[in-house]
Image: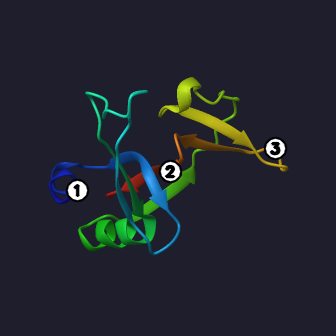
């Protein structure tokens, strides 16, 4: 991010998994075949970053403002078959949907970083 901030003139746009807590997660997911062998393209890394830490970092390195918006998925996605990794949604009582991949909650944020 330091290098991107250093060479960018106006705006940077980022989308990733961000937590609203002072918590970060670095996870490694091992997906198995039916015979419990690890799948060929596994493991997968799913990292969730602290938004406050990311914001502080960007501001310390020249950003003037960060604006973030939670990604709210507006379609229903079915749970993948065979108990494998895949994206699906769970509808809350409020009507909002939570996005998951396998057993992991996916807290996507879209972030605009203003440099001027």
Whether 73 is drawn above or below 1: the answer is above
Point 53% across, 67% down: residue: 20
Disc 1: CA contacts within 10 A as few (<14), some (14-19) or many (>=20): few
Q: Where is residue 53 in the image (x, y as percent from the top left)?
A: 37, 71
Q: Quadrant of residue 74?
A: top right
Q: Nearer the viewer, residue 10 or 20?
A: 20
Q: Nearer the viewer, residue 86 or 81?
A: 81
Point 69% across, 29% down: residue: 75
Whether 52 is drawn above or below 1: the answer is below
Mark before the other along the chain sequence, 3 or 2: 3
Q: In which quarter of the image is residue 90?
A: top right
Real-space Cα separation, disc 3 to disc 2, in angstroms: 19 Å
Task: Name the outermost residue toward the front.
Answer: 35
Residue bearing the label numbered 2: 109
Q: Where is residue 26 in the image (x, y as percent from the top left)?
A: 33, 59
Q: Which of 61 and 30 is in front in this view?
A: 30
Quarter placement of the N terminus:
bottom left
Tag shown at residue 95: 3
Disc 2: CA contacts within 10 A as few (<14), some (14-19) or many (>=20): some
Real-space Cα separation, disc 2 to disc 1, in angstroms: 17 Å
Q: Where is residue 81 in the image (x, y as percent from the top left)?
A: 58, 24
Q: Is mark 2 on a helix, strand or loop?
A: strand
Q: What element carries label 1?
A: loop
Point 53% across, 52% down: residue: 107
Q: What element carries label 3?
A: loop
Q: Nearer the viewer, residue 56 or 75?
A: 75
Q: Nearer the viewer, mark 1 or mark 3?
A: 3
Point 52% across, 40% down: residue: 102
Residue bearing the label numbered 1: 1
């Amino acid at each position: 991010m330091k290098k991107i901030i250093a060479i960018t003139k106006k705006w940077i746009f980022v989308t990733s998994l961000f937590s609203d807590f002072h918590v970060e997660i670095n996870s490694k997911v091992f997906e198995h075949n039916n015979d419990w062998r690890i799948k060929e393209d596994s493991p997968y890394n799913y990292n969730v970053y602290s938004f406050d830490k990311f914001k502080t970092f960007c501001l310390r390195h020249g950003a003037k403002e960060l604006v973030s918006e939670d990604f709210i998925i507006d379609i229903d996605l079915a749970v993948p078959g065979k108990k494998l990794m895949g994206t699906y949604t769970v509808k809350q009582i409020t009507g909002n949907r939570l996005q998951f991949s396998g057993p992991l909650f996916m807290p996507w944020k879209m972030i605009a970083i203003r440099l001027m």
